[in-house]
Image: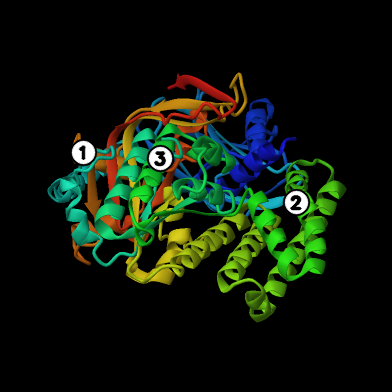
Amino acid sequence: MSKYKIYFAVFLFACVFYGINQASAVQAQSSQNSVKPSADVRKLEPRKPVIRDLCGGETHAYEINLASGQFLRASVGGGSVDLAVRVFAPGGDLIFEIDPSSGPQSPQKITVEPTATGLYRIDIRAIDEHIKPTRYEIRIEELLTAEQYKKRLAEIRQKQQPVIKWLKKNAVPLKSITASDNFADLQPLKRILRDVRVLGLGEETHGTREFFQFKHRMLEFMVREMNCRVFAIEASHAASLNINDYVMGRASDGAKALDSQGFWTWNTTEVREMLDWMREYNAKVPAEKKVEFVGFDLQINDRAKQELLAYLKKVSPRRADDADKLFKADFDELRRLQFTSKNERERQEALVKMNEIRSRYNELLGYLILNEGRFSRQSSPADFKFAVGSAQILAQYADVFYHIGSDIQPIRDYYMAENIRRAAELYPPDTRIVVWAHNIHISTGDDEGKYPRMGNNLRQIFGDAYYALGFSFNRGGFQARNADSEAKVKYALTGFTVGAAHEETVDWFLAQTSPENFIIDFRSVAKTGMIADWLATPRQMRAIGAGYSTNSEKSYFKPVTLKQEFDGLVYFPTTTRARPNPSVKNTDMGNKN
């Protein structure tokens, strides 16, 4: 397996929380079509929760009789084990699916609005075939008759109108989403962002052209009008050094620099156009006005190893020999084995070796810190700080990907926030930073303490000087790796198109506000009242990562409490697919609906 295929698999695994399918998880999902439920099909009844033990690879089936127009809300709790949940209509059609790699969401929430009367089936499966029997519970939380649900919907729609009215009144319309010198429509942001040092720009998908274009425009606005000097992105810290060399004028091949960061997500024409603007801008301004490009993620670390090895050869040649041997240990291949091997002994041996490598990276980082004074004098304080930064990234990577499943995400988000903090410390306190990442990471939520997002850590570091601006859309296109079980080419980078957002979702509310692009700020909302209550109520919102399956569209909506997670949102009524650069492999330029 090539290095970048391994990195791709690791990247997918790292981002499991927001619906990104890692390679073997997608294979497991594909194989579900051939998995037959146990002969013991049980009835699911109100006020009668079922607690059972589920073996790896086994499927349990439940049945419930529903009439057209009813409403069912159920939950499945299985601790930290990833459970795949699928619901089938009376005719056998799959109508609801929870992505098996969607991370720490125990209990899993099931909602069914039946359009036909008959027997509905719920299948539950433990994705990891190697796990020991694990205990889970399935229960009906709410079952409404058609008449009760009709009344519920009428009450909901009555409450919607004041919220929509407030959104219409307070939306800041955007005259353009593409970069230009005219920032007249963005001037209200100067008041909103007056005391903000770190601006987080999110995204509901990793492949939407309009998201990327508007982030480019926002960067230009922040640089030209609000003293921004750092652009930080959810990409490899080490590999992004090559991109920074390009935007700072120290390298001439922009395509090569962008390729080197390794992720197709950012290897698009929209990102390249932004890099070219940064390079052009930096060439015209003095050093103190130049804009740096920084990656804060942990993967693809060849450049970090090269830089750190060169430094050790200067200050500690004997230690350089040990580091060279350490850097040649293939942690990524061990990670792949630990994750994909069906041989228990092989997986355990890989885990032991990974832990040894992790310990050696930690020891190397400690060695550098203990010798700060001596090494700084032998080189320079700046060179020493850069070397420590490289060692930190390597130690972070080994620590994060030594862990398994849902344990990965909280650690990764913490380290990404720390890397942004370290970057901020290199600049004067009035320097602003623009951060580009998925909504999940930009969010200031913490999933009730189970998963503090990167934005939550940034809020703890910077307080209200961190502003989380989420991105939303109603309908349209984006690109993602094709996770459909019937895909002709597995994981091909494919264009997808989705219809209008479901009623009562965050995206739906925004769609009722205006047919145009706009920004809405939540910080100005009074602490009490109808709008405060609306912001404090959990609602579904799109969250599409690197993988997407048309078989489970509803699973790409996740519960969001706006008051806890975002300071504002930018909304696009219609979107299109981001344009991949020619160097991106396994790309399908067709489109799926």
Indicate whether 50 appears above or below 480.
below
Q: Quadrant of residue 143?
A: top left
Eye-nearest disc, 3 or 1: 3
Task: Please say whether residue 541 is visible from this viewpoint.
Answer: no
Q: Nearer the viewer, residue 33 or 52?
A: 33
Q: Is residue 457 left or right of residue 302?
A: left
How far apart are labels 2 and 1 at the CA level?
49 Å
Q: Quadrant of the N terminus?
A: top right
Q: Are marks 3 and 1 in contact (CB under 8 Å)?
A: no
Residue furthest right in the image: 345
Residue on which disc 3 sits: 276
How far apart are labels 3 and 1 at the CA level?
37 Å
Q: Amino acid at mark 3?
A: Asp
Q: Secondary structure at mark 1?
A: loop
Residue at the spot x=30%, y=48% of the render? 220
Residue on which disc 1 sits: 512
Residue at the spot x=52%, y=30% of the render? 549
- In primary-sequence order, the first of circles 2 and 3 is 3
How far apart are labels 2 and 3 at the CA level?
34 Å
- In primary-sequence order, the first of circles 2 and 1 is 2
Q: Position of residue 501 (x, y in %)?
A: 33, 35
Q: Nearer the viewer, residue 64 or 402?
A: 402
- In primary-sequence order, the first of circles 3 and 1 is 3
Residue on which disc 2 sits: 331
